[in-house]
Amino acid sequence: MNIFKRLLRIGQAEIHAAVEKMEDPVKMTEQGLRELQKDLTEATEAYAKVKALAIRTENEQMQCQKESLNYAEKAILIMQKAQAGHVDLGKAEELAREALSLRRKFYAESEELGHQVTTLQQSSRDMFRNTEILKENMEKWEKELRTLKARAKVSKATEQVNKQLAQLDNNGTIAMLERMKAKVEDQEALAQAYGEIARGKNSSLKHELDELLKDDSLSIEKDLKAIKEKLGITDNP
């Protein structure tokens, strides 16, 4: 039964570790920026393709307009030659009709290409604007990522310092310092006591010396008095 409980605790620990890893804001932001960079690259390529297609379509439109005007001029030129008698009128009318038909054909193509150019240019502008917005957002998010990384480092260092402070006395450091402090204070008190004893002893010796000197003085006076009495010397009144 204990084995199953232990396996369950291990499984829960692995799950918690996986969740914490998944919720790492720095890693998630970096992954998001990599995905956005990929989107930006694809969007830029798509914009370039649409822009190129718009340019090519516009060139085709201009060519169709040119061809349309060219065939219109040819129809007029043929009829002018018929008027001058250089070409049979019937033949000239047939050729003019053909030229006018081609003019209409190229004109219609030019109109259709014009609509396509308008649509492509609008799409190109929209894609360019969206690409620029994506670039601005990426720059902003990259700055935020740098700030987030710096904050993460500071918070990690702060956490480590606070953890060390919280666990400072786990190894008995403070208790050891307190014992050392008490020992030093005991040594200081003992040294002070010895000093006071030494001072007291010196004072006693001085007192004894004074007493001895005092006694010697009295003894000398007694001896002097005895000598004076023996010699019959009397003190002057």
Image (cartoon, rainbow, N blue to C red):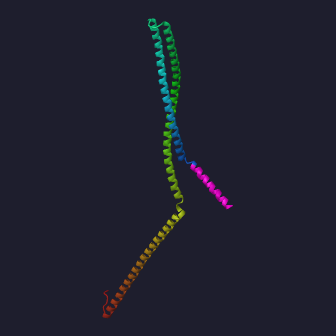
Residue lying furthest right in this view? 1
Task: Name the main secondary structure of what is drawn in magenta.
Answer: helix
Location of residue 6 (image quadrant): bottom right
Q: Would residue 60 be visible to someone looking at this image? A: yes
Look at 61% across and 55% down and name the residue there.
Answer: 13
Q: Would residue 128 be visible to someone looking at this image? A: no
Report the front residue among 163 and 74: 74
Please state if 114 lies on the left or on the right of 223 as rendered. Answer: right
Residue 114 against residue 36 in the figure, above or below: above
Please state if 196 lies on the left or on the right of 33 as rendered. Answer: left
Residue 154 against residue 96 in the figure, above or below: below
Residue 135 magenta: no
Can you give x and y, in whole percent of width and height, for residue 25 in the image? 54, 46
Report the front residue among 34 and 13: 34
Residue lying furthest bottom in this view? 230
Can you give x and y, in whole percent of width and height, for residue 177 in the image? 49, 65
Region rendered in magenta: 1-21
Report the front residue among 123 and 188: 123
Q: Where the C terminus falls, by quadrant?
A: bottom left
Q: Where the N terminus falls, by quadrant?
A: bottom right
Can you give x and y, in whole percent of width and height, for residue 179 in the image? 51, 68
Circle count: 0
Can you give x and y, in whole percent of width and height, for residue 174 in the image? 51, 64
Residue 5 magenta: yes
